[in-house]
């Protein structure tokens, strides 16, 4: 069974630190893995500065979401251990495939 761990975060630095941690752990236990970086997704939100009169005064906010995927064929019990060690601002999605 092939398992894909998809990680995403707003902070590129924390995501890179966690990726390096995962590389060290997988190399320490001699697990086979493949890391694929995904492109950064950029979301732009626009809000009105004033709710009353001035409709032309708008404010833009930008949110960058950084992602990477880790492909492995580990046992499900090991994957559960990696799920509990994820920092708070990193989102993890586990995808099972045959």
Image (tube, grey):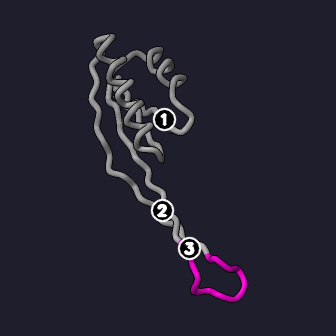
| Residue 72 lies in the magenta stretch | no
Q: Which residue corresponds to mark 1?
A: 92
Question: With 64 as the anchor, is 26 left or right in this view?
Answer: left
Q: Quadrant of the N terminus?
A: top left
Asked whether disc 3 touches disc 2, contact meaning CB atoms under 8 Å apart, the reply is no
Asked whether disc 1 touches disc 2, contact meaning CB atoms under 8 Å apart, the reply is no
Real-space Cα distance between discs 1 and 2?
22 Å
Q: Residue at x 36, y 52 (%)?
A: 40
User: Residue 33's spot in the image, x, y percent?
Assistant: 28, 24
Q: Secondary structure at mark 2?
A: strand
Q: Secondary structure at mark 1?
A: strand
Range shown magenta: 48-59
Question: With 56 as the anchor, is 29 left or right in this view?
Answer: left
**What residue occupies the far bottom of the structure in this picture?**
53
User: Residue 75's spot in the image, x, y percent?
Assistant: 40, 15
What's the mark number on residue 36?
none
Real-space Cα distance between discs 3 and 2?
10 Å
Nearer to us: label 1 or label 3: 3
Please say if 95 is above or below 23.
Answer: below
Counting other residues with Cα less than 10 Å from the Cα at mark 3, is it few (<14), some (14-19), or many (20 or more)? few
């Amino acid at each position: 069974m092939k398992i894909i761990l998809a990680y995403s975060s707003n902070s590129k630095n924390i995501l890179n630190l966690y990726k390096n941690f995962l590389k060290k752990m997988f190399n320490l236990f001699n697990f086979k893995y493949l890391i694929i970086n995904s492109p950064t997704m950029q979301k732009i939100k626009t809000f009105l500065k004033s709710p009353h009169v001035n409709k032309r005064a708008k404010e833009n906010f930008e949110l960058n979401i950084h992602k990477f995927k880790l492909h492995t064929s580990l046992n499900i019990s090991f994957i559960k251990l990696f799920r509990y060690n994820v920092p708070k601002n990193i989102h993890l999605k586990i995808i099972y495939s045959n």
